[in-house]
Amino acid sequence: MHQQQLTETLFTAKKQKGLRFADLETLLGRDEVWIAALFYGQASAAADEAEKLGRALELDADAIGALQEFPLKGLGPMVPTDPLIYRFYEILQVYGMPLKAVIHEKFGDGIMSAIDFSMNVEKETDPKGDRVHISMSGKFLPYKKW
């Protein structure tokens, strides 16, 4: 099963069941952002996770198997065109180097892991308009010298 077909199958089943990612978070014991990444083929499920999701969404064996395949991650080499995703791209274009400088100043020469990583999305009520609060936590990995 191709990723686009799997993504469509997952979202259709989720909608038909009236489920939210937060509902699936409770079912799988995984964060809702990770589950959304699984829907888009940016993560792979363990067999038991795929089976649980398969039962909840009434998926066939092909879809359950496809959830367990190792994904090709990333959006590709293009500038994103979806407005919300583009804003993240824009944030990194503007603040990427400043963030890098601050991280290096606090931790040294290295990177923040996207493998040993977690993220959380919260809605903050504000009288001037609701705000999106995103927190990211990644293990610091210093560059090795040899």
Image (tube, grey):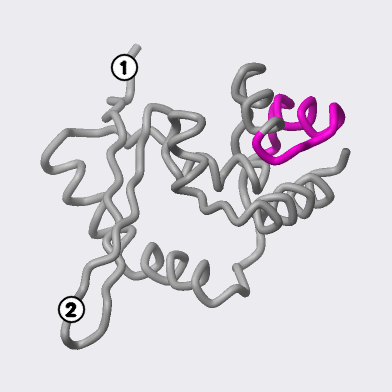
Secondary structure type for disc 2: loop
In this rendered view, identify the residue nearer to me: 15 or 49. 15
Identify the residue at image location x=21%, y=51%: 101
Marks 2 and 1, the one that precedes in the sequence = 2
Q: Is 128 left or right of 64, judged from the image as shown? A: left
Whether 87 is drawn above or below 37: the answer is: below
Q: Nearer the viewer, mark 2 or mark 1?
A: 2
Q: Which mark is residue 131?
A: none
Give residue 54's position: percent from left, percent from top. Answer: 71, 32
Q: Farthest residue toward the bottom?
A: 128
| Residue 58 painted magenta | yes
Q: Is 73 left or right of 5, judged from the image as shown? A: left
User: Which portion, as a residue range, is magenta?
Assistant: 56-72
Say which amino acid is labelled 1. Lys
Q: Which residue is mark 2?
A: 126
Q: Quarter of the image holding residue 3? A: top right
Q: Is 142 left or right of 39, judged from the image as shown? A: left
Q: Residues within 10 Å of mark 2 (few under 14, many from 20)?
A: few
Identify the residue at image location x=77%, y=54%: 8
Give residue 110's position: percent from left, percent from top. Answer: 29, 32
Identify the residue at image location x=51%, y=71%: 86
Q: Quadrant of the C terminus?
A: top left
Q: Which residue is mark 1?
A: 145
Q: CA distance from mark 2 to mark 1?
A: 47 Å
Secondary structure type for disc 1: loop
Q: Farthest residue toward the top?
A: 146
